[in-house]
Amino acid sequence: MDNEAPALSIARLRSVWDAEVGPSAGRALTAAACAGLFGAAHVARVGSPLARGLTGAGLALLLAAIAARAILVRRRRGDARRTVREIIGRTDEALGAATLRALTLADRAAADDRVGSPELAGLHLRRLLGRASQARVVERARQAATRWASAGLALGAAALAAAAIEPSRVVEGLDVLAARGGEAPLDLPWIEEVEMTAAPPEYLHQGAEELLPFAPTMQPRGTVITVRGRPVRAGRALVLTDGGAEVPFVDDGKGSVVARWTLGASTTLQAAARFGQVRVRQADAQRVVSIPDDAPRVTLEGAPRTVKLLDEPSIPLRYEITDDHGLREVDLVLRAGAKEERRVLSRPAADAKVDRGGYELRARDPFFRRTYVPVEVRIEARDNDPIEGPKWGRSEAILVIPPQVGEPEARRYAALVKARDALTDLLADRIGQRTPEAGGAAAHAAHEAEVQATARAAVEAALAADHGGLRVRGRIASLARGQLARLDAALAAERKSTTRAAHQELLDETEGALLAFDAGLRGLGHRDARAVAQRLADVADEAAAAAELLGNGDREGGEVRLEAAVAVLGGGGVELGKLGELGLDLGEIVANDLRRIARARGASDWLHAELSARDLAARLRRPEPSFGGGGRGGVESGAPRGPDPGDASNADESVAQSERDLEELARDHAAETNAVAEELSRASRPEDIAALREEAKKHAEAIREAVRDLPQPGAAPGSAEAAAAAGREQAEAMAGALEQGRPEEAVTSGRGAMRSLGDAKRLGAQAGGFFPEERAAREAGEAQQALAEELAWAEEALRKLRQAAAERARDGLGKSSQREGSLADRARALRKRGERGDGRMPEEMLDRLDEAEQAMRDAQRALAEGDGEGGNERQRDAQRLLEMSRSEDQGQDGDAESEGDRNMARKADIPDKDKHKGPEEFRRRVLEGLGGTSEPRLRGAVKRYAEGLLK
């Protein structure tokens, strides 16, 4: 070593040291790294942000420490002084110190010749390095290597323990540690022996099906997908996830876990393990395509299209609706601007998938009457989807264009004006006719009949036509038909005697009919004008509200509303001007006020526009003539007006009076009919029924015995068995009524049973040898014979009860007979008044009044003779005829509001609570009808239901 260079000697010593210590140190550091990594994996497996953060920081520090040591070791190898101090100094401290001094001297001598000879300094250093014992260096290095080996062994044992507890935990921890966005990068197996089933929603009424695991499938939305499997490793929080939502797997108690996923949108399902906020998926994926429950498909025949209500006053709606799973509700939807109205057309039962139906919209529909803008008509249907909520399907729209306000009334008025013109032409023709000579009577009669037929056809056409949804009804229709009958009678009289006097009589009657028709037309125009004015007043209020919005700065909402309201007012005012004198007057007022509103709009003076609209609304709500000599005027003229003394005919008022008289007669007669029924009811004594009840029980048992062998309900309708079963039910109802002392009900049920048993015999004879039908017919015939005897007994018992009640009520019935006679006299007087003059009634009304009078006379005689039941029956016949005599929508003209008829009678008798028995009689009949169920056990419940219904 003496001849070696100092640097080489120092490097050799480092090499000897490293050869002994390096392997042990490397193994120790490797063990430390593994222990740190495995420990970090266990900590990171917790999955919380804190645990993962601490783990990452610890691993970073460990790696930094290993790298720093490697750099430090490399630097030490190039540092001779450090090598001498760490290797020679640790084996021989004095030699190490001397060597460091010699190394320092050699470095100084090499740098400065004045310090000494570099050769001598180097020789001294080499001699000192030569004195270093390699054996002692090796021994010392082995001691250090032993310490490193011990540390490495300990760390290796720790790493082995960390991995040996459960190797998969290390993998899971490292996977969790490497996660990004809550998802681990490495997929791991979590469950095996997987089974899957799909259970569709209950409302689909489909059974569950097994799925091939991890094979794509299509299922209805809302299906519950059940995933069952055996965990690969226990103790993991397993979930079923689609990457967003997740449901946990739970233990099924049989060593497996199960999760249930309710299908929404199409998705891919995977099993995963949850570690804190990190999810580690399994590679296997189940693709599920969701089949949504589609909205119902609604087809409306003819849609889309546009309909003008005046051209089509009746709009038939025929629809067909289909749904993939089931329908719940079908609605007719009417929309007009911001207004909407829904009407339920049907609620299909049993989840029907198809529904068809129809509906008819008429021009007089209340929704059309309340709106003046186009109406969108649709059919909408709701399905039964409980998963995402019911969905509505809509048809294409039918756009309905409503008429201008008052346009239907104006059309009707114009049609009646044409009819009046036809009557005027008839009168003019007859004025120009000369009295025929003896030889020209036939030709004259033929001509008169021809011209009258022409006029009649014009009037009948006006009465029968539909005028934009309005028809000619009520007072004006009754008056017109009455005057036609008046003309027919006058023409028939002239045909019998073609003389100057007869022709003059025909001329007078024609003139009277024309004047009566004209009076009725004027009255209709007056009432229609008032009604239209009231509706236009609402539109004027809308215009005022829109102007107020504009004044407050709401231009977007106010401008559109004001424009629409002004347009409606303009069109309505024009139509209003066509409704006679009052209509013309009010129409001019509308036009004038619209000009005021237009001036204010042009100047953006919304306050005065609002005031003008409100002034117009107030004026239209008092739809009186502006000026009327001696009469009453509106806002302009002051006091209200009475009847115009200049009217050439009072036909309109005469017809109105006849209608009021007929209404009072029908009301009074209904009260008298109910009074007789009450009198008979009071005359019936409970002791008479009680005396009958014991014998009735025996007959009830006989009835049940007679029908005991008849079939039970349930046979096919229209068969002999079904008819026999119906007869059995009615016979049992008869028996129950007899036991409870209700002979009237018993007789009614018995007669029904006889009819049903007769039907059973007839159907059995037509069965063509089919045994069950023939047997039912035979048994029905036997039961019918027995039942006929029991029915005869019940009818006789009922007759006796009624006879006894009538005897007790004879005094009351006598008084009722006198009142019935007075009512018959009123009917005759009303009929006589309706046979002539301006108040002439239509022939069909006169015929019914005549029949009603005869029925009243019959009832009067029967009541006088003590036949209460017969008299009451004839009273009901008379009441029915009186009701039929009343004209349709009496007192109304199809649109004119009844409040407009302010000249109607102010005096009317109001029946007190003890006299007016109509509602009580109705209630009694309902209770008796519903309470008389054939099943005695149910009778009380049905009666309570009926009482609740009538409340």
Image (cartoon, helix red, strand yellow):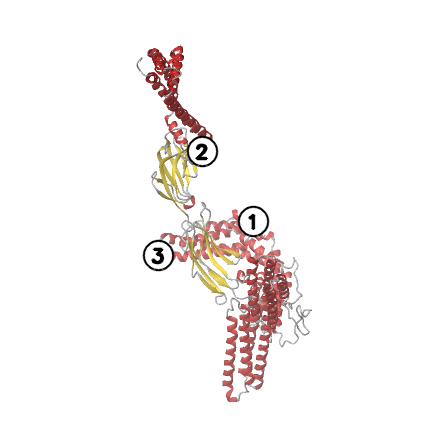
Residue 22 x/y as whole percent: 35, 19
Image position of 614 with respect to 155: above or below? below
Q: Quadrant of the N terminus?
A: top left
858 sits to left or right of 145? right
Residue 519 x/y as whole percent: 60, 74
Task: Name the residue type under label 2.
Answer: Gln
Q: Residues within 10 Å of mark 3 (few under 14, many from 20)?
A: few
Task: Name the residue type under label 3.
Answer: Gly
Image position of 405 with respect to 922: above or below? below
3 or 2: mark nearer the eye: 2
- Distance from Cα at disc 1 to Cα at disc 2: 65 Å
According to the picture, the residue beneath numbered tag 3 turns out to be 768
- In depth, the one of 746 and 514 nearer the eye is 514
Image position of 666 with respect to 207: above or below? below
Q: Earlier in the sequence, mark 3 or mark 2?
A: 2
How many numbered marks are there? 3
The mark found on residue 944 in the picture is 1
- Distance from Cα at disc 3 to Cα at disc 1: 47 Å
Task: Name the residue type under label 1.
Answer: Arg
Q: Earlier in the sequence, mark 3 or mark 1?
A: 3
Residue 482 x/y as whole percent: 56, 73
What residue sits 51% from the left and 80% below the top? 451
Residue 596 x/y as whole percent: 61, 67
The mark found on residue 277 in the picture is 2
Q: Residues within 10 Å of mark 1 (few under 14, many from 20)?
A: some
Tags 3 and 1 touching, CB below 8 Å: no
1 or 2: mark nearer the eye: 2
- In depth, the one of 458 and 383 nearer the eye is 383
